[in-house]
Image (cartoon, rainbow, N blue to C red):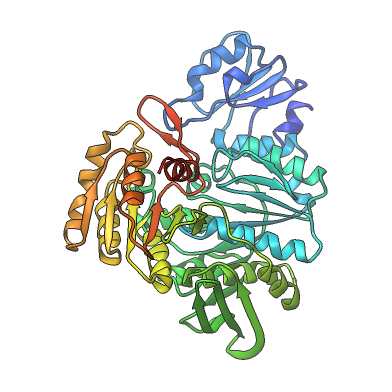
Amino acid sequence: MKLSELMKGITADIQNDKDITSVAYDSRKVKSGSAFVCIKGFKTDGHEYASQASQNGAAVIVAQDKINVPGVDVVYVEDTRKALAVMSGNFYGNPSKRFKLIGITGTNGKTTTTYLIKSILEMAGQKVGLIGTNQNMIGDSVLPSEHTTPESLELQELFYKMADCGADTVVMEVSSHSLVLNRVYGCDFDVGVFTNITQDHLDFHETMENYLEAKKKLFAMSETAVVNIDDPRGTSVVKASSGRVITYGIDKSCDLRACDVRLSARGVIFDIVKKNIASDIRVQLAIPGKFSVYNALAAIGGARALGIDFDTIVKGLRVAKGVKGRAEVVPTNTDYTILIDYAHTPDGLYNIITTVREIAKGRVVTLFGCGGDRDRTKRPLMGEMAGKLSDFCIVTSDNPRSENPMSIIEDILPGINSTGCEYKVIENRKEAIEFAIENAQPDDMIILAGKGHETYQILADKTIEFDERKIIHGLLDKR
């Protein structure tokens, strides 16, 4: 591909229209004929590796800051992250134009909603690509996932593979980080879905206002916006939308409203009110909790935006299964129940604990921690939420990263102490799980919150295997 074709849509002065064989933003992946794009990351700046890229055979270097690398062409652009996104799309032939694209953003519910939409679209006979926190999928084939939303180069490569496999629609989680860092820049979303927004990622965004503004970027890129109008910031998202809007909720007047909601341990059942007119559409979803009603409504809105009929939607939701690490019951053959859930925000804890409360016959025991090198201000809030709603708490470690695990726990404790809830601190998470099992009482509901689908734990100097399912079964086998 000629450099001019690769950089189509980017304002740049191209002096030498070379043939380009690949695109890279990691100098270690540069080969002869590559275009190396200097992007600024969290810890490193690609401009510092321009010389290494040149030595590895780069045909051209794309930069936004002045660099001195003799013997290689340098093309300057205003924003290398945007340039990388556009170049990646051009390199792979802008594959997202070959299918419908649905983006889902919000603090909670993104992963489950992607799977619900996938189930509906497959019921409609479509082949569906999925990109998200748990995994990437093309139909039934599973691909590994490192980020909620991949960097633009990897994202466009995924789009290319999905298009080549005949995907009719791709549904993807769109993180606030990816929107700020332009990983989805240049993507034309047929549908953007807003689930909710509560405190998270303030280590990156600094304020809730910045966090919201990041989320709203998706809806300036979407032909149709599907918005949870019950969320206090839903109206702001509607105003930021550039196209058609479909609103959903339970409490407020909207386009798709759930009424006659019935919650049970087996899942949720509710009826749909369309634009304030009652219908005979009854929805069943085998995932318990009020939050599941909102996730189902988000999926219904996304499917309706693509013209899927209600009969197909109802059938797709009826056969939809739960997602690994989301209210996942671990088979134990005991007189108590253990659930694994990804809840890592105050609102996430509220959702899972209140859901368990609806079905619990005995105590609700919540085991949780907070991630290191992340928003410290939510730690006491999580302690307070867990303490208010649980009968007993076990405060432990999550992914401490470079922080001292006990320092993280000490940030949590003021919140839980304010509630008067009984609790125990056990820094080692495996030992904390062992304590929960050894002290379980009949009919207890034990929630292991924070890890969810993750099968590892990130420590200061290494990442270790940490699959809570294996740990639970190992401890039970020992007993």
Residue 446 x/y as whole percent? 38, 57
- Quadrant for the N terminus in the image: top right
Q: Is residue 269 left or right of residue 437?
A: right
Residue at 79% across, 59% down = 126
Q: Work out whether residue 12 or residue 159 is closer to the camera in this orientation and state it.
A: 159
Horizontal and vertical percent position of residue 153: 64, 35
- Locate residue 321, reporting x and y percent: 63, 61
- Going by the image, does 109 lie left or right of 430? right
Question: Image quarter for residue 374?
Answer: top left
Q: Nearer the viewer, residue 402 or 264?
A: 264
**Image position of 303 (left or right of 167):** left
Q: Is residue 445 above or below residue 43?
A: below
**Residue furthest to the front:** 479
Residue in the image at 27% along x and 37% along y: 405
Badge count: 0
Please, which residue is most extreme toward the bottom here? 278
Relative vertical location of residue 351 with respect to residue 150 in this rendering, above or below: below
Asked whether the viewer can see residue 222, the reply is no
Quadrant for the C terminus in the image: top left
Is residue 365 in view?
yes
The location of residue 312, given as percent across then percent down, is: 75, 73
Q: Measuring 78% from the left and 26% from the top, which residue is drawn there?
A: 2
In this rendered view, identify the residue nearer to me: 383 or 180: 383
